[in-house]
Every structure is written in C-alpha cells, then in structure tokens.
C-alpha cells in the first residue's frame, strides 16, 4: 500500500478512479428496467446482478445518481417500529447496514451510536413500553430509560422540569445509527455497474408501454426501450410515475424540511428525537448538527424552504439544547415525501403484470435501502413477493389491512 | 410568513389555516363496489399543478375553497363554498331526507 501510494503521488496523471462508467447508448431491450437511480434503484440493481444473475438491467435516472431524496434525507437508520411486520423488516435493514461496507468494499461511514427518542407525555411513555416489548420480541435492542439514564446518555440535554414540554422518559434504541447517504448509492451503483448493470443518468421516463395488462416497455427522452420487467423506485414522484402505468396509489406528497448547522466540537453521541416536538437532531462526523423536522402542513411538489419551518424547528431544538442559540445555520433544504395513509411503504406486485412497485417511502426510505434492494430483487427474480414484504403490498388498502406506523415515525406527523 | 386570503377574515398567516384535501364528490354507496369504495377512501389525486381544496381558518372555524399550484406554492384564488355548492348536501339514506 505505501508503495502504491508513493507511485500514485509521483505519477504525472493522477489517474482518478471512475466509480460509474460513462453513459452509453440505450439498448433496444433489457430484462429489467429500474426507473429511478437513487439508493433503492441502485441497491435493487446490485442485488439482481449479484445474487440472481440478472445483469441485463438498466437503471434510468432523470437527473443524476442519488440526487433525489437519497441526497436529502437525514440518514437516520433504526428499527424501533411498533408493528412486528415493520420491526422485522427494518431489523434486516439495520443488519445489512452493519455489513454493507465489507459487502461493497466501500466506506459507508456506518456509525451505530444508538438513538434516543424522548417522551414528554404519559401517552408517549405507554407507546414506548409497547414498542420496547415488540422490539425485544423481534430481537431488536430497545429499552425504556428514565430521566437519570437519559442524563447519562446525553448529559447536555435540557432536563429542566419547568420546560414547556419536560422530558419524562425515553426509548433507548441501541441499534440506531447513521450512514453516509451518498456512499450508499455510489457503493451499490459501482458494484452493480461492475457486474454489467447499465446506469443511464439524464434519462427521463415519459411513458410506460402496456399490452394486455402487462408492462412491455418504457418511453424515455432518449427513445423507447422494450423490457421484461419494470420497477419504479422514484421517491417523491411515485404517484406520478405510477399514473403513467395506469395505477392509482394511496399517496399524498408533502415536503419535509431539514437543516444543518456550522460544525461544532463533538458533544452529541446518540441521535436524539422527539415526536412531540417534531424534531430530531444528530451530530455528523464533521461536527455539524443535522436537524430534521415534521412534514410541511400542506401538499406540495416544491423543494423550497420556509421561514416558518425554520422558526418552529429551531424553537423546538433550542428547547432540547438551549446552549445552541448562538450557533449559525449553514443550510436548509426540503425533500419530497410520498406519505401513505399508514406510514408504511408500498412494495411488490401492482395491478399491471411485470410492473413492480417500490413506493410510498415517505420519511423512512433511506434506512430501508439495503433490505428493500434485497427483497425487491427476490420479488422480481421469483415473480412473487417474499413473506417479509408481503404485509406492505398495495392490496392491503382494498382489504383495509393497514400496517400503522404513524406513532413510530419520529417527526412526520 | 406566507399569507392566505380568507374569504371571511381577509389576509391571515398560513399557520392559522388547516387543509382537508381536494374538493370532490362522494360516490353513491349503493352504486359502488368494494374496490371503488376502497379507492375513494385511500387514493389521493396527487395532482402536479393547480388543485381545488377545502381549507379552514382554524380560529374562526370558517371553511372555504382555495385553488393553488402544488408546484409553485402559489395560492391563486380563495372563495366561499357557496360559490360551488348552491344547495345543502344530504349524506344520509334517501328516506332520511324528509326530516
């Protein structure tokens, strides 16, 4: 390694490693076309190629790789949900994240520092007890903590009993953490490309071709393509893209805003979240504080930032950490979230044959990237959704068998 | 703060308002099969562009209709519901109408 480094340093050309091959012409047909080059699309392509031998795959991205919600989320990874179906699903994702750097040979900067969710009411404490028990039953590390334990976990937290919303207790989720969002999509895309998957950026799908209830191809701004299977993985545009295939989805679209502060000395180890205050905070490896909030109050497709959200979110953040009042904000941004009625995703079969859904990822999509890629690849290879993701099929709405996660989705309601 | 024009109270901060989704007709329960009814319950139109929605000015509980653009975040027009709904709507079974 030192010799290699020396050679590289002395070479005149400094050859850069290209992770993603340059764009080529589109082929006439593919076995699988994946609409959307974000984390989910890249993970799916990788799993299809690596574990199912399906390499004649194209990932079509209208912008650039990982430039949508993969770039806009707050990178929280956790599995402390409330229904056993969700807990088992997200647990597999956390397990995959712990091995992901090795699997892809790409540094995911996965940092499993634990997540602390705060309760400010007795009602929250009751839900936390239920979540802790369901989590433990499914093998996820979650436990109730009292004020003394919270003080030890996060010494800088405002534990004042006279605060507007005093902290009564918490749910301590040892498995929670963060990962580098860009690395996740680049790592998957790079390995998928090595296995023969084609990644086409600046390629927008404008229509879905169908015949006899089956998807047969897609139309793009670079021409039409025939394909055996189509998968849509387009967070924020799920309902719009599904409409091209004649499918109506139970999705409403809201922006979710987040912000980041100037870098500070490391002081905050766990991720701290409070549903009552619509606020979650974590400190990045660079020292910046990432502060995420609840969804905007009305439906919108715009990624604009608002002053009212900034004021509200900061007020709540300062209630938890009053000493941050002099800290400067660096950025504020929004992602477009596909909210489903039960705060669970929509995965698997659609009413159109050979057309597969990876949608409804609201505010919980990034943490599911590995498991969704793995299980959706299985779904397409076998033509049938595996048991782990069966509860999240689109058909659950017509049978009213919803999987309600509204209470366990930290700050989006 | 973004301002919305309430037909009753004039221009007010947007934080004083709540929205209840698009203006639409409820399908007739007697003419609707289970799948159509489930679609009515769950599916949203998720329109990219101009939408017509129910809004409420919460402090005064005043309901009205707003037309706005879901791409540009512009509020184009707000007006009383009476502009669309001339008569009182009945949601009960037909035999209840007499009362």
Image (cartoon, grey):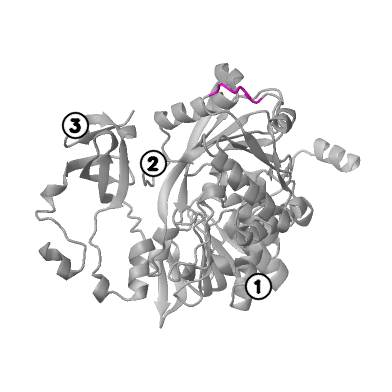
Task: Check chain identity for marks 2 and 1: say if they share one.
Answer: yes
Out of A237 and A163, give the one closest to the viewer: A163
Relative to residue A301, is residue A47 drawn left or right?
A: right
Q: Residues within 10 Å of mark 3 (few under 14, many from 20)?
A: few
Q: Position of residue A119 (x, y in %)?
A: 59, 37
User: Farthest residue toward the top?
Assistant: A326
Mark 3 falls within which chain?
B
Q: Residue at x 58, y 59 (%)?
A: A41
Residue stretch rendered in magenta on the structure: A157-163
Task: Evaluate if marks 3 and 2 touch, with contact meaning CB atoms under 8 Å apart.
Answer: no
User: Farthest residue toward the bottom?
Assistant: A212
Q: Tell me, for residue A54, which label it has, or none.
A: 1
Q: Tell me, for residue A154, which label it has, or none.
A: none
Q: Residue at x 76, y 51 (%)?
A: A98
User: Farthest residue toward the front?
Assistant: B99
Residue B97 position by quadrant: bottom left
Query: Which residue is disc 2 drawn over?
Result: A297
Q: Secondary structure at mark 2?
A: loop
Query: Where B47 sits versus A149, above or below?
Result: below
Most frequent secondary structure within the magenta stretch: loop
Query: Which residue is disc 3 drawn over?
Result: B9
Estimate the spatial distance between the alpha carbons at disc 3 and disc 2, rounded to whole Å.
Answer: 20 Å
Mark 2 falls within which chain?
A
Mark 1 falls within which chain?
A
Q: Secondary structure at mark 3?
A: loop
Query: Where A270 sits versus A194, above or below?
Result: above
Task: Check chain identity for marks 1 and 3: say if they share one.
Answer: no
Viewer-nearest of labels 3 and 2? 3
Query: Is residue A404 in the magenta section?
Result: no
Out of B80 and A112, give the one closest to the viewer: B80
């Amino acid at each position: 390694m030192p010799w290699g480094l020396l050679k590289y340093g002395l070479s005149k050309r400094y050859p850069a490693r290209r992770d993603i091959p340059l764009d080529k012409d589109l082929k006439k047909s593919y076995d699988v076309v994946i609409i959307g080059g974000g984390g989910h699309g890249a993970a799916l392509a990788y799993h299809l190629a690596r574990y199912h031998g399906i390499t004649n795959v194209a990932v079509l991205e209208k912008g650039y790789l990982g430039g949508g919600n993969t770039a806009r989320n707050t990178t929280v990874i956790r599995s402390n949900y409330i229904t056993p179906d969700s807990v088992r699903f997200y647990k597999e994702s956390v397990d995959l994240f712990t091995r992901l750097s090795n699997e892809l040979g790409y540094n995911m900067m996965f940092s499993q520092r634990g997540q602390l969710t705060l309760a400010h009411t007795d009602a929250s404490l009751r839900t936390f007890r239920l979540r802790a028990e369901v989590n433990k039953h499914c093998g996820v590390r979650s436990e109730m903590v009292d004020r003394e334990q919270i003080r030890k976990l996060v010494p800088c937290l405002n534990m004042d009993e006279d605060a507007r919303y005093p902290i009564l207790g918490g749910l301590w989720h040892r498995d929670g953490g963060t990962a580098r969002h860009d690395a996740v999509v680049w790592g998957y895309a790079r390995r998928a490309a090595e296995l023969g998957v084609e990644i086409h950026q600046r390629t927008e799908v404008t229509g879905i071709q169908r015949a006899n209830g089956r998807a047969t191809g897609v139309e793009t701004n670079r021409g039409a393509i025939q394909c055996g299977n189509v998968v849509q993985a387009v967070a924020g545009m799920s309902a719009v893209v599904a409409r091209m295939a004649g499918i109506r989805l139970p999705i409403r679209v809201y922006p979710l805003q987040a912000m980041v502060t100037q870098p500070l000395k490391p002081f905050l180890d766990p991720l701290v979240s409070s549903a009552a205050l619509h606020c979650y905070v974590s400190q990045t490896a660079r020292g910046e504080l990432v502060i995420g909030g609840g969804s905007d109050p009305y439906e919108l497709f715009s990624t604009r930032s608002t002053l009212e959200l900034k004021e509200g979110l900061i007020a709540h953040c300062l209630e938890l950490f009053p000493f941050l009042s002099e800290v400067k904000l660096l950025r504020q941004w929004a992602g477009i979230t596909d909210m489903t009625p039960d705060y669970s995703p929509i995965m698997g079969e659609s009413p159109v044959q050979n057309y597969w859904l990876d949608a409804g990822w609201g505010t919980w999509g990034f943490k599911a990237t590995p498991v969704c890629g793995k299980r959706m690849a299985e779904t397409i290879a076998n033509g049938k959704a595996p048991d782990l993701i069966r509860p999240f099929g689109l058909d659950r709405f017509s049978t009213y068998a919803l999987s309600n996660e509204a209470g366990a989705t930290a700050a989006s309601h | 703060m973004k301002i919305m024009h309430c037909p009753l109270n004039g221009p007010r901060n947007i934080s004083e308002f709540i929205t209840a989704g698009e203006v639409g007709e409820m399908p007739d329960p007697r003419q609707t099969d289970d799948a159509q009814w489930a679609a009515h319950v769950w599916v949203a139109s998720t329109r990219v562009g101009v939408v017509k929605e129910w809004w409420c000015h919460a402090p005064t509980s005043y309901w009205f209709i707003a037309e706005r653009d879901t791409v540009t975040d512009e509020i184009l027009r707000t007006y009383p519901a009476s502009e669309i709904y001339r008569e009182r709507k009945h949601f009960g079974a037909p035999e209840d109408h007499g009362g």
